[in-house]
Image: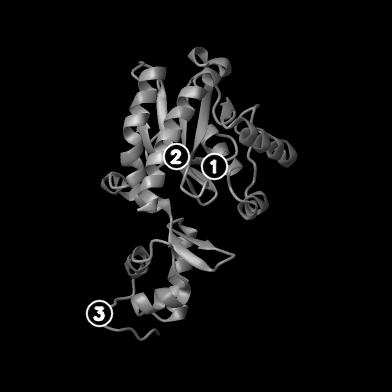
Amino acid sequence: MDTLNSTHPLKDIDILEGLASFPGGATLSRICESTELNKSTALRLLKALADRGYVIRDEATKIYRLSYKILALSSAVLDTIEIKKIARNYLKEISGITNETIHLLCKDGTEAMYIDKIDTPNTIGLKSQIGRHIPLYCTSGGKILLAYSNVEYKLRFFSDVSLVQFTKNTITQKDKLLAEIERIKENGYALDDEEHHDNITCVAVPIFNVNGDVEYSISVAAPTYRFSTAMAISYVPSLKKCAQQISEKLSILEVK
């Protein structure tokens, strides 16, 4: 049985609060120092939280960090995300141009997650929800995040993730998906041509941080009957312009 300081009860919240004090993540030793939990207890709790998707472990650096799934627990927490504050007006701008559903996404483990959404003014829209996770390999916003990931991440992704067939257009062959994400990097945008859901077309572009890495993407999604791939591509210049403006503001914030 673990012997713990009485001021640190054995519960998952100790780990979450401990990790919250290390925005860039922490090793097991630092977590133990912060929480006053012994290594075996901390490791067991970290594994349980990782299994539920609340904690991510970098296999290369052995560093643990909180995942974006924590944000799905409370919309109030989502409101505090700086990227959401920065991007909001630009999402509205794209919404005004397209009159379709706009999403802001981030990568969370081996999936993408919606962290903001502007609904379409049209009667028929999408049922997507902030905090919901979607696949990286068959959604436009997800493919952007996958395409701009580093080599190590891509190797782990293709090793760990099964490419499930959602529709007849879903790319499930590794070589075809690799070719697709190379085209995405060349073109600077990604399409979801009814690959995740039938009758839904999406287009997305990347948002770059100060280091030139991509942590977020913006997508436009709509029913295919009023949003063809040609129409989706026609909005790419406007999407890229807004994404660039968000990137510039994000870079200024990160430099400070």
Percent x, y of residue 167? 61, 29
Q: Amino acid at mark 1?
A: Leu
Up the image or down, 200 lies above or below 181; here it is above
- Where is the N terminus found, in terms of image quarters? bottom left
* Disc marking residue 145: 1
Q: Using a 10 Å C-alpha cutoff, classify the residue at mark 3 as few (fewer than 14 neighbours), some (14 to 19) or many (20 or more).
A: few
Up the image or down, 224 lies above or below 66; here it is above
Frontmost of labels 3 and 1 is 1
Q: Using a 10 Å C-alpha cutoff, classify the residue at mark 2 as few (fewer than 14 neighbours), some (14 to 19) or many (20 or more).
A: many
Q: Amino acid at mark 3?
A: Thr
Frontmost of labels 3 and 2 is 2
**Residue drawn at x 44%, y 62% as measured from the top left:** 65
Q: Amino acid at mark 2?
A: Leu
* Disc marking residue 66: none
Disc 3 from disc 2: Cα separation: 38 Å
For label 3, the residue is 7
For label 2, the residue is 105
Which is nearer the N-term, disc 1 or disc 2? 2
**Residue drawn at x 63%, y 53% as measured from the top left:** 160
